[in-house]
Image: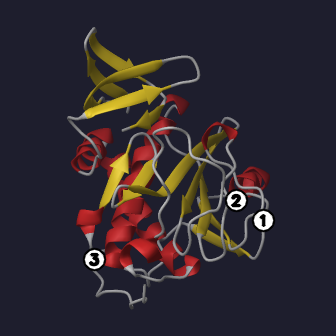
Amino acid sequence: MSTRPLPPQTGHSPSVWPDGYGRRILDEVDSTNAEAARIAPDLSGPEWILGLKQNAGRGRRGRAWVMPSGNFAATLVLQPPGPQATWALRSFVAALALHDALVDVTGGPECFALKWPNDVLLNGGKLAGILLEGLGARHLAIGIGVNLADIPAGGELPEGALAPVSLLSGTGVTIAPETFLEYLAASYAERERELVTYGFAPIRAAWLERAARLGQEIVARTATSETRGLFDTIDEEGYLLLKTDSGPCRIAAADIYF
């Protein structure tokens, strides 16, 4: 597929770095989340870490995250206000910010969707993932991986798992990781302000507007159980609510299959 230039800007400005956010770009790193853990004690404010080459990336449940050249691997480390019990809501903030940035980059909102709890889909395939890790009592690391340029090579997908896709193959848009970080940092800062100012309600509503398979049957799997039901909503704590044959089911964490 031939590449095309970025479309006219549709929202957040990539040319203005958000006030109060630091930035460091590393040519190579084991894992941007690991780097976040190393630098967190010395930070005075939120900091973005971008790794142009990442050789020991991790996804959810300790899975390897393979990063071909030109793809995006970054972590935002910050000190969230409020109790630790609310920190997980940043998964939805980050997913919305990713969606915002991708729409700004491509000009095409119709091809992107959000998959609970922490994936971004492009034309039904997995484009991006988010990994939250607490770093002690004060800091949170929000790791974000996006297949900007290529699809990771890997083993056989679990049954029912979505195939990976890349931004380039799916939209024809090519963008450097450093440039994408500028879009993402701007959109994240705006969504974070929204959360801190107005609470989770507007974030929840915006996320649900972009949710994949809302109102449809899905399967939620954990290490010990599998629950099938209609995707009803997410609640005020970000839990997944399913309508099942045995009644409503509230799920804190699981892998979702369509």
Q: Which residue is mark 2?
A: 32
Residue furthest to the top in view is: 246
Q: Is residue 62 above or below residue 16?
A: above
Q: Residue at x 61, y 63 (%)?
A: 152
159 or 123: nearer the eye?
A: 159
Mark 2, secondary structure of its residue = helix
Q: Is residue 102 above or below residue 120?
A: below
The answer to whether the residue labelled 2 contacts the one labelled 1, judged by CB atoms less than 8 Å apart, is yes
- Image spot of residue 23 (x, y percent): 62, 71
Q: Compute the Cα span from label 2 to label 1.
A: 7 Å
Q: Which mark is residue 250?
A: none
- Image spot of residue 65 (x, y percent): 66, 54
Q: Amino acid at mark 3?
A: Gly
Q: Earlier in the sequence, mark 3 or mark 1?
A: 1
Q: Compute the Cα span from label 3 to label 2.
A: 28 Å
- Image spot of residue 252 (x, y percent): 45, 25
Q: Compute the Cα span from label 3 to label 1.
A: 32 Å
**Residue 83 seen from this side:** yes
Mark 3, secondary structure of its residue = loop
Q: Which residue is mark 3?
A: 107
Mark 1, secondary structure of its residue = loop
Q: Which residue is mark 1?
A: 29
33 or 166: nearer the eye?
A: 166
